[in-house]
Image (cartoon, rainbow, N blue to C red):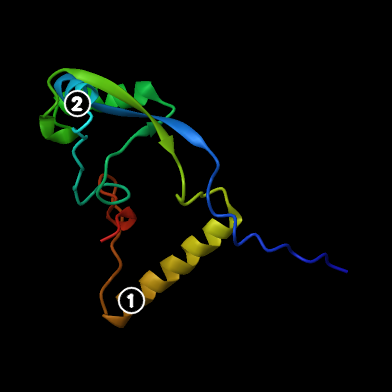
Amino acid sequence: MALPVPDFSGYERLPSWVLGFHGCDRKVALRVLKDPGKHLRISRNGYDWLGSGVYFWENDPARAMAFANDGMDGKVSKGNIKDPFVIGAVIDLGLCCNLFDQAALQELSAAHRSLNGRFEQYETPMPINTEKRRMLDRGH
């Protein structure tokens, strides 16, 4: 006899905080740190992994610095970084999609099927990831 599965539908909020690190130019970081009204600029590139936003490397300041260093060469950040710097933040995960959670994985799978159905409905191919561009990951 199988045991009944409890209803966990009310448990959606992750009770956790993470440290995030953002690689940018020193002038940008100092401007944000000195003036509470200033914010990091939202990235709106077509290849941004999860759509428009400000990206942080979770618990990895070294990776954020590597990103900032790549920004000096124009590999990322359109070469706007002259003096690589890392800014840190405490981030409340809140209602983010936890890919370690079974219910979230089921919701993500259903969303993918729905999106794929929409593309089929309009006889348009789904975006495809390539080696350097992650168009499939971006929400359009």
User: Could you tell me which secondary element the residue under label 1 belongs to?
Assistant: helix
Q: Where in the figure is residue 95, as x and y percent of width and height?
A: 46, 51
> Of the numbered discs in the image, which one, if any, rests on residue 24?
none
Residue identified by numbered label 1: 118
Q: Is residue 52 above or below residue 86?
A: below
Residue at the right extreme, as displayed: 1
Label whose residue precedes the other's in the sequence (2 or 1): 2
Kind of residue at badge 2: Asp
Residue drawn where x is 20% and y is 43% of the image: 43
4 with respect to 40 (left or right):
right
Q: Residues within 10 Å of mark 1 (few under 14, many from 20)?
A: some
Question: Could you tell me how far apart the alpha carbons at marks 2 and 1 are, in whole angstroms?
Answer: 44 Å
Q: Where in the figure is residue 66, as x and y percent of width and height?
A: 29, 23
Q: Is residue 45 above or below residue 88?
A: below
Residue identified by numbered label 2: 35
On the image, which quarter does residue 39 sit in? top left
Q: Residues within 10 Å of mark 2 (few under 14, many from 20)?
A: few
Residue drawn where x is 26% and y is 27% of the image: 23
Kind of residue at badge 1: Arg
Q: Is residue 140 above or below residue 28?
A: below
On the image, which quarter does residue 90 sit in? top left
